[in-house]
Image (cartoon, helix red, strand yellow):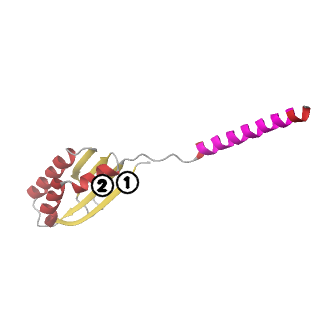
Amino acid sequence: MKNRTNLGVLMIVVILIGTLFALTRASSVAPQGSPRIRRTILLKFKPEASPAEIRKVLAEVKANISSLKGVHNVFVGAQTLDRTPFQYGISMDFDDADALKAYRQNEEHRRTHNDYGKLIEQAQISDIRDE
């Protein structure tokens, strides 16, 4: 009878240690990042693009992007660093990949992109997932 009691206690201790090990292991795994994505677009306009055309492009882009569902923190403006070839930038935060996809498929965004693409000499796009 004593051996059975000792064996039962030993089994409980082993189960507890195993459970504690599993819980410790699960909490040490790196947490998943948030689903948010920040898109930054850097633009270099062609020399023939007038200041009025550039202002119009940036204003339309900001108005269009700001109205989209799942888009936040829209920044549109002139570059502040002299050591980059890009003169202007657009930055925005998306709630998730679905909001970014909706932005890319948005008809007004595509129209603006197609209308003003001829004024852009160079562009660089970066998508960063929030961690």
Helix, strand, or loop for circle 1? strand
- Residue 89 in view here: no
Q: Residue furthest right?
A: 2
Residue corresponding to mark 2: 40
Residue name at image x 27 percent, y 57 percent: 41
Q: What percent of the width, then of the height, locates residue 122?
A: 23, 66
Q: Residue 24: within the magenta? A: yes
In the drawing, what numbered circle is on residue 128?
1
Amino acid type, mark 1: Ile
Q: Is residue 123 left or right of residue 3?
A: left
| Mark 1 neighbour class, 10 Å CA radius: few under 14, some 14 to 19, many 20 or more | few
Q: What percent of the width, then of the height, locates residue 127?
A: 34, 56
Q: Main secondary structure of the magenta part?
A: helix
Residue name at image x 23 percent, y 56 percent: 105
The stretch in magenta equals 5-26
Q: Is residue 106 left or right of residue 115?
A: right
Q: Is residue 64 above or below residue 23?
A: below
